[in-house]
Amino acid sequence: MCSHRLLRTAQLLTCDRALADELLRDALAMTWLQWRRLDDQPEPYVLRLLVSSYTLHWHHEHGPPPGDDPVWPALRKLSRRERAVLVLCDVDGLTEGDAAELLGWTVGHVRSLRARAHADLGLDPARLRDVEVDEDDLSGGSTRQRLAAVDRRVEVLRRRRSTRHTTLGVVLFVIAVAAWIVVPPLLPRPTTAGPDLPNVDHRLIEAPTLVGYQLPARLTVNEVPYEYQRSEESPTGRDLLRVAIPPDRRPQALAWATARGQVGTVVVSVDGNVVSHSPGGTLESGILLSPHRVHLVVLRVVEPTTITRIGLAIYQWPSPVFDSRPARTS
């Protein structure tokens, strides 16, 4: 549905129709492999892949320009980064802030590149919006060809990923075996305070407020106490909060909330899977994260308002206290 707009952007980036088709094909194939992790609007994700692939990994030589318009040789004089910023801001209509967020650069860097591109272009940037490009054939011919090309590219990427995963699995297995043999004798013996829970240090971190709610310093989930670690909040009016939680050797628990008076439902997903629906305007908890993994937690408000604020608090299994005294022998 969006390929004709994306193809136009790709042609302005590459200044070559054949290279634009190839660039778009690779972006669509990589998007398909991540489809279940995407939000309801995948076009920004494809655009990000399109531009980042061109600016960072593209090594193809240009063919003849797509037409006789003097815009094409003027665009080819620009660096890849200048051309990317120019196309995003002056053709696709993104603000400098949106372009910086899409590209992962600072706003100042984007503004500097855009000013330099305007100076080096040698003509009015508004002309880029009217330049003639080879539009996608929406009657079905080129679209079917592109889908077939994307399918072939997806299979190639899947085979490569399968090979990488197999190699990585073998390496991790060797490391795990080596750690199982070598590491345990080197560790001190911990003292325990019961059959299930480690002996814990009770100096708790004082938990702050989260979107107007006072967080508890200790959160109990499934009869196990978890201690406050950190929290994050979204700006007012934002209906989405994404938090990447780095791996830890201990399990973690989550608490989340929206501002008082928020209506609707809060949808919580972990690693692309929806795990909870809770009412707005409440403080909820109870989701556990497995250790030794990176987790992406996404909170989305179904009916956002101007007062919408979302918060996420992360609690951690308490650290064991190691006893440095030698163990007694009977």
Image (spheres, rainbow, N blue to C red):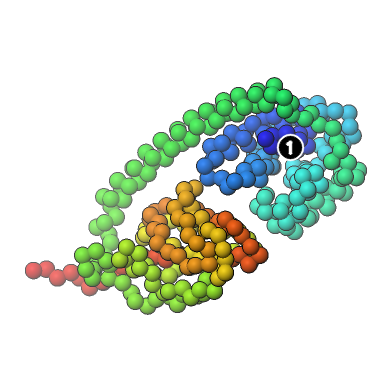
Is residue 312 in view from this perspective? no
The C terminus appears in which quarter of the rendering? bottom left
Residue 47 lies, in percent from the top left, at: 67, 42
Q: Quadrant of residue 301?
A: bottom right
The front one of 277 and 294 is 277
Amino acid type for the residue under numbered disc 1 = Arg
Query: How many numbered marks have been drawn onto this rendered protein structure?
Result: 1
Is 90 displayed left or right of 225 in the figure? right
x and y percentages locating residue 64 in the rendered image: 81, 26
Eyeballing the image, is 273 above or below 259?
above
Whole-percent x and y of residue 73? 85, 34
> In the picture provided, is 180 more to the left or to the right than 83?
left
Q: Which residue sits at x=81%, y=47%?
A: 90
- Numbered disc 1: secondary structure: helix
Q: Report if residue 113 is visible in the image.
A: yes
Mark 1, other Cα within 10 Å: few <14 / some 14–19 / many ≥20: some
